[in-house]
Amino acid sequence: MSIDLKNNWDTYTDAGKALNVLQIVIQGLSVLVDAALLLGDALITAGLVAADCAVMVALPVLGAILAVIGIVVALLLAFLGVVKPQEPPKTPLETFIDNTARPLINGLTAPPLLSLTYTVPASLPAGSTAGFSITAKNNTAAAVTLTRSTLTLEVGNDDNALFSGPTTSWTVDSAFNTTKPLSKAGTVGASPPTISAAQITENDVNTGLNSYDVAVVGPATNGTSGPLVVEVGASVSISWLGTISKAGSTTMQIVETLVNGDKCRLSPVINRV
């Protein structure tokens, strides 16, 4: 028992340590009392000690007292919380998370911040045919160059869809500028045309719901669009015109694609009231 106590010393509480030590002491004293009784019996048999001497009378009493104390200590050890709470061994999943997943995640580079500052309307009138614009402004101290800035909205009969119509394919109004607003429902545009152009891609989501990616790029040169370059303090306006869906809210997606391929994301919420 003493070896077990030595090997597990740190697992016991202070009370557990004290009771275990006391139990070992009691066991040791009990052994000594038993040995003394055997020796006394031998001496009595040899006629060297009287059977009714004080020591021989006291030894059985002392043995009984030690036995009682030993029983009490054993009961205390059995029913008291003498072992410190131990954490259960890690599961294979926890081991994988600690040894593999967490170091991998911690080693990932944080995504870059958005290069442009986007001003998005907080609310739009539900059920009306209305246009709205999002402004992307360069508030930094240097010119911003992007491969594109893509804004995604949905049209159709879905709670998240900003527009309920028109359900025919939307198009780009290449003549749009801030002094000539959109006039036809189902059109989008980017302005000013000197630094920006809009490209629209229709994505079928499901029956009655379409998603449109409007990519804002630089003006086309020889039929090929260039990067979107926004000088310090300059801004780009992106507009839509359509029928706003019933009351609810819409979470739209804005994704900036940097020239190195990295992407920055923003998910503003527009309330339809």
Image (tube, rainbow, N blue to C red):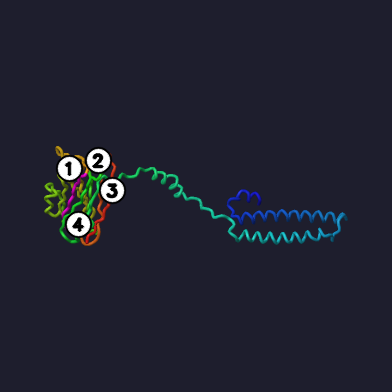
Frontmost of labels 1 and 3 is 1
Which label number is shown at residue 89? Answer: none
**Residue indicated by mark 1:** 195
Compare marks 4 and 1 and give the one earlier in the sequence.
4
**Residue 272 location, quadrant:** bottom left
**SS label for mark 2:** loop
Which label number is shown at residue 265? Answer: 3
Spatial separation of the CA atoms under disc 1 and disc 3: 22 Å
**Residue indicated by mark 2:** 142
**Residue 21 location, quadrant:** bottom right
Residues tagged 2 and 1 counted as in contact (Cβ below 8 A): no
Q: Residue 17 versus residue 199: which sits nearer the camera? A: 17
Badge 2 density bin: few <14, some 14–19, many ≥20, Cα 10 Å: few
Spatial separation of the CA atoms under disc 4 and disc 2: 36 Å
**SS label for mark 4:** strand
Frontmost of labels 2 and 1 is 2
Residue in the image at 14% along x and 37% along y: 222
